[in-house]
Image (spheres, coloured by chain):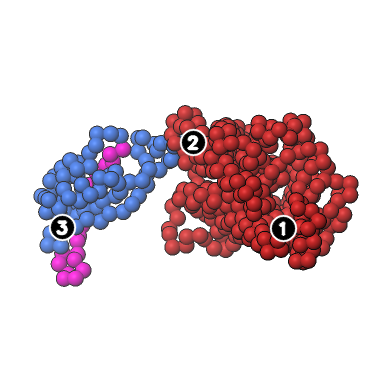
Amino acid sequence: METDVIEIKYALDTFYFLVCGALVMWMAAGFTMLESGLVRAKNTTEILTKNVALYAVSCVMYLLMGYTIMYGGSDGGILPDSWFGNSIANATAEEVLAGAAADAGDYTYYSGASDFFFQVVFVATAMSIVSGAVAERMKLWSFLAFAVVMTGVIYPLQGMWKWGGGFLDAAGFLDFAGSGVVHMTGAAAALAAVILLGARKGKYRADGSVNAIPGANMPMAALGMFILWVGWFGFNGGSELKVSDIGEANAVADIFVNTNAAACGGLIAALITARFMFGKADLTMAINGALAGLVAITAEPLTPGPMLSTLIGIIGGTLVVFSVVTFDKLKIDDPVGAISVHGVVGIWGLLAVCLSNPDASLSAQLMGIGVIFAWVFVASLVVWFILKAVVGIRVSEEEEYEGVDISECGMEAYPEFVSGTK
Amino acid sequence: MKMITAVIKPFKLDDVREALADIGVQGLTVTEVKGFGRQKGHTELYRGAEYVVDFLPKVKAEVAVTDEMVDGTVEAIVNAAQTGKIGDGKIFISELNEIIRIRTGETGDDAV
């Protein structure tokens, strides 16, 4: 291949990678808006603070150690070669051209720094999942302390097992863009937190029945859904890692189409399921349904056609409604439905890989689900337990009643409105 | 002079205002309030779980009138605010000792 062509392909693939990374970064805004819409007004500033802070913490921790753990190499496939340090390295032009000349297929075709950028925004996504589930009652600084461990060690280690060429990858476990590595991981950490944290005050009546606590701002929640939806094209589309030839360009286009189809299927299914179950078109369920469709297709957005993708989304969207209701009954209080959307449907997405990808095996998928869930859940439980014992993870009852905006951040989200009943 | 306080359904406020203007009522003070009556609030559904709305939003309209206008005012409010369904609200009538128009210092019926 001519040198110019190789250079242009390198530039194009790097550019594509960076743009997709920026789209995924924008998902942080989506989670922020979604969560701020589904909490009460008195907890808005705190959930915003949590989301902007966790993004920054995630990026710093991943730079300090996460990326090295995940992609710095591993001999045995279980522990990384090294834990700390900066592993970002761009290949020189000579190296790229020499690699291309030696092997027309698998040479370095994008910038090493663009790879880091794409990976770092995924970590923030996983951490964002946790913040919604623990909303309205967790201490801000305990949450951020957990974020340090989660994004520095817990997430990167299991990420290495799959995407870093570790033992799950060797076992044939398939997870294209992270139904398991990102979404189920976030949900498992959230589940551990919610179990230790307990339900919001007022969520359950004296007789144990469920009392709904409506979110304050549905326009924010709907906007958050669409921002996440847009970001997901980068999440799944970028995970193809390459766009610069006809085959790859077709694959990327297929992924965009399938990702969109699954989200639509999930939204419609959740809306209809909620209508039949509750008698009303519950917007929050429709939003959860779209996100469930997106999570479900993330493990394999390439091999199913658009029809099968829609069906995978439909099953995810139906599942999420039943899951939300079931978790409520089990007294797992998850204000935004994050454990259902990312955990339950994440597992469905990993299993759905077997529907279309001939390389997938059910046993490898089950192994991946079991290993990742067990590691993240147990490690998170230990960290949350230590935090609970040392500094506490829950605000006082009075602070919870007044709203964590005042107790944690010292400011209200809407100070010029007179608040009604809390 | 009497103070007539009507607690009505919010969407009926415009109708009540028009009806009062038609019979020559000169002023009206309106407050957004919440409360419950025999209906005792109601339940709504969010994400499959019920929650109780203990206090329903209402509008409280206060109008000061001369004694001879009381019956007409009450009739106008009832006609305008009635839907026949539960939650239409109530009208309270109380004695009014004095009225003073701040700008001119007029008192009594002149200040209504």
In percent of width and height, residue A10 lies at 69, 60
Q: What residue range appears in magenta?
A: B87-107
Asked if residue A342 shows in the view, the reply is no
Vertical position of residue A209 compared to residue A169: above or below: above
Specify the amino acid type for callout 1.
Met
Give the foreground label among 2 and 1.
Answer: 1
Q: Give percent across and percent down for residue A187.
A: 67, 43
Q: Position of B20 compared to A316: left or right?
A: left
Q: State which quarter of the image contains the N terminus of chain A.
A: bottom right
* Residue B100 within the segment the image draws in magenta: yes
x and y percentages locating residue A396 in the rendered image: 63, 52
Chain of the residue displaying label 2: A
Q: Which of the chains bears the disc numbered 1?
A: A
Rendered shade, chain B: blue
Q: How many marks?
A: 3
Seen from the viewer's position, the closer of residues A353 and A302 is A302
Asked if badges 2 and 1 are on one and the same chain, I answer yes
Residue drawn at (31%, 54%), measured in percent from left and top?
B31
Q: Name the residue under label 3.
A: B26
Q: Is the magenta stretch mostly helix, strand or loop?
A: loop
